[in-house]
Image (tube, rainbow, N blue to C red):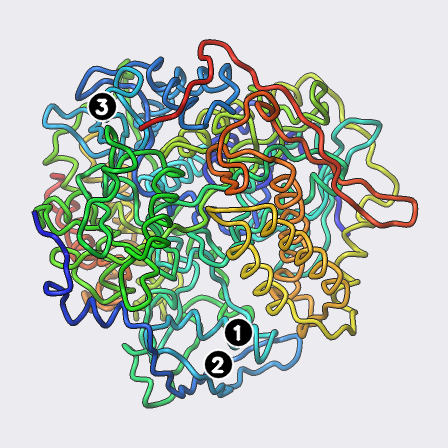
Amino acid sequence: MQIHQYDTVIVGAGGAGMRAAIESTQRSRTAVLTKLYPTRSHTGAAQGGMCAALANVEEDNWEWHTFDTVKGGDYLVDQDAAEIMCKEAIDAVLDLEKMGLPFSRTDQGRIDQRRFGGHSRNHGEAPVRRSCYAADRTGHMILQTLFQNCVKHGVEFFNEFYVLDLLINEGRTAGVVAYELATGEIHVFQAKAVVFASGGTGKMFKVTSNAHTLTGDGQAVALRRGLPLEDMEFFQFHPTGIWRMGILLTEGARGEGGILRNKDGERFMERYAPVMKDLASRDVCSRAIYSEIRAGRGCGPDGDHVYLDLTHLPPEQLDAKLPDITEFARTYLGIEPYTDPIPIQPTAHYAMGGIPTNVEGEVLKNNTEVVPGLYAAGEVACVSVHGANRLGTNSLLDINVFGRRAGIAAAEYAEKHDFVPLPDDPGALVESLVSGLRESTGTESVAKIRQELQESMDTNVSVYRTGKTLQQAVEDVAALKERFKNVSIADKGSRYNTDLLEAVELGNLLDLAEVLVVSALAREESRGGHYREDFPTRDDVKFMQHTMAYREVAEDGTTSIRLDYKPVVQTRYQPMERKY
Amino acid sequence: MSTPTVETHSAALDAAESGSVQLINVTFRIRRFNPEEHPDPVWVDYQLLMDPKERVLDALNKIKWEQDGTLTYRRSCAHGICGSDAMRINGRNRLACKTLVKDVNPEKPITIEAIKGLAVLKDLIVDMDPFFQAYKDVMPFLITNGNEPTRERLQSQADRERFDDTTKCILCAACTSSCPVFWNDGQYFGPAAIVNAHRFIFDSRDEGGEQRLEILNDREGVWRCRTTFNCSEACPRGIEVTKAIQEVKRALVTRRF
């Protein structure tokens, strides 16, 4: 076991982690621990853009953006946080441009902007051009630009180091413990401040836009150390994933004029969202798609999908604005999007919930108190700027605004505080986790349990949920967790043991799936991405509050999830009926 | 405005939506290497029943999940954006997640091995550090002097288009590890580093072009390129890599960029 000492340790090297690292490296001795080489992170798969009220192409302002964000989140958004994000959005985009990001340009040479779901002028009057973009590669450009600037600032990366534990001593952050994939060695990183920026949890679903690597590692570590997870029942299903594969096709396609159609060729979104139509928020579009499918208006031999139609757009526009997604259709479906509509279905995309933080990125250990020295940003965190449903582009914004804030706050904390002594035997938990899996002679397979988890989640915890399906998922997850205790792996070696890695990841997914389904079962209302057919309306009296889920360990070692609730911060906007 | 109806369906769309799948037997011949077990690599055959429209990465996953958990490779996004899974498939560098089984002649065994020119650490995993070091050596970040504008730097659409092709690079190393010069001379910067230098040299906002050109004027720099076009063929993002290298060479001669 090796022991390292850094002022600030950042866990994860996607957009949020690298944005934080650029700030903290300039202020404190920083290490970035990342499961993947930084440029492999899933920020790179984001496509359509990053919203900011630059008003480069039409009238816009940050207050309209804030309103759209709060409404998009079905009023579960903490409004102070949303206002900060939408104000700082403008500088966040300009900062990226100055770092070198090659945005698409207007004919005046300014950053170009396009329409996106749920983003409107003057509180819902009509779609507005707010999304700053680089073709349909905005996430790729953000990831590359941030990595380039990490190189410029000499950020110190520990690549393929998988963080498996968080060390807290006397109530303060002491460091993290990581497993080095190349060697199997365990490393303790003592740190004054730790920033979790490890991304989402999408791999608990079968049809997902998420990478194989998105297994909720940071959330699971926090949960195991007794920290709460906020609003985990809110998971976004993006309307347009490639049918069956789940590969993302950007909402920017509809921003450019693309249309959703059912098997009769009807532009069905006109019925569900008369003003915003195909640019209604994602939860609304995904429900509409499944309503069409359920009503027998789905496409294909089994009527189990609908079309994203781009055929009326000029090929030059597709080539210039949507080159990657049109290539995905050609590569994976063998169709020509100039002339063929693209078969799509909703795809599990984004966790609105996560590790609760305040607007400085400090992690909350309950409704009011923080864990000194611990920070989180990006999809792993819940500030909450996304509430019950995130607007398109606001995740790229979130990682830049709150990644920066967390990086600055962590480094400033590290400047002012000393190291907390490491607890006795700091690597013990990770050593027993790793050796337990490596030495297990059990009969269960990681791949089989993961597949059953994903199938149950897709069947029971998708766009439409009921008490019955959620109860089924609670039972399924409990049974799978039990079977997971008897799992074994084939690779017993210490060199690049990805077999072991996948087992650890599955353990994380099971823990988080449990939190998600328990939180969802208790929320007897419909709000944003959480739609209960047995409780089809929003209930502001009972549920205008954030879920806070804690893992409790009984004396006999059994664990359970305890739910508590936290008030929503409301400033400017009173809840209204949500129409698009 | 076109309305897709049954009548306008192309054969391709019908095929894409077809519910019935013809599974075929495919042999994957994979070059395995684990120095913990044995000092030499060995070719191992795996038989799979596959939908020919599945990805080669799906095949690797099936082998790992159903037959042999020790098979080791890198993967993440699974749709050609993250650059994790470059490998030699039937002797050609490709991304496993962007290569469909039907496109690599499943009638015969499909061979899979690690990319060349970088040390193999285990199975399909190579040491990427020398690759990223070459990238870092070309100063792959915007260099500017003088005052920063308050708002964004202005850039015309034509100026933005000038370097668009090389912004697409995902650093997968398919190009660099397909280059015969790189195989024989590990100190050569390699195509990917030059592509990333190009991305800044031809960016109208950048003022570090001269510095980067001097770096690439080195004996291990751009002049080692023998214009074999392997890199352009290998690039999964369709970047015209050889052309970019030629443009850097020309800029070195003319000092105009």
Chain letter of disc 1 in the image: B
Would you name the residue on which mark 2 appears? B31
Q: Residues within 10 Å of mark 1 (few under 14, many from 20)?
A: many
Up-down relation of residue B22 to residue A289 (above or below): below
Q: Nearer the viewer, mark 2 or mark 3?
A: 3
Front residue of this view, candidates A130 and A297: A297
- Labelled pair 3, 1 in contact (Cβ < 8 Å): no
At 37% from the left and 60% from the top, the residue drawn is B173
Q: CA distance from mark 2 to mark 3?
A: 57 Å
- Is any part of residue B125 visible from this angle? yes
The numbered disc on residue B123 is 1
Q: Is residue A92 left or right of residue A273?
A: right
Q: Residue furthest bottom?
A: B108
Name the chain letter of the residue that bears numbered label 3.
A
| Real-space CA distance between mark 3 and mark 1, rounded to the nearest whole angstrom | 54 Å
- The type of residue carrying mark 2 is Arg
In the rendered structure, the answer to whether residue A495 lies left or right of residue A395 reads: right
Q: Are marks 2 and 1 in contact (CB under 8 Å)?
A: yes
Considering the image in quadrants, where does the C terminus of chain B appear?
A: top left
Question: Which residue is at a point 38% across and 18% down the rendered structure image?
Answer: A67
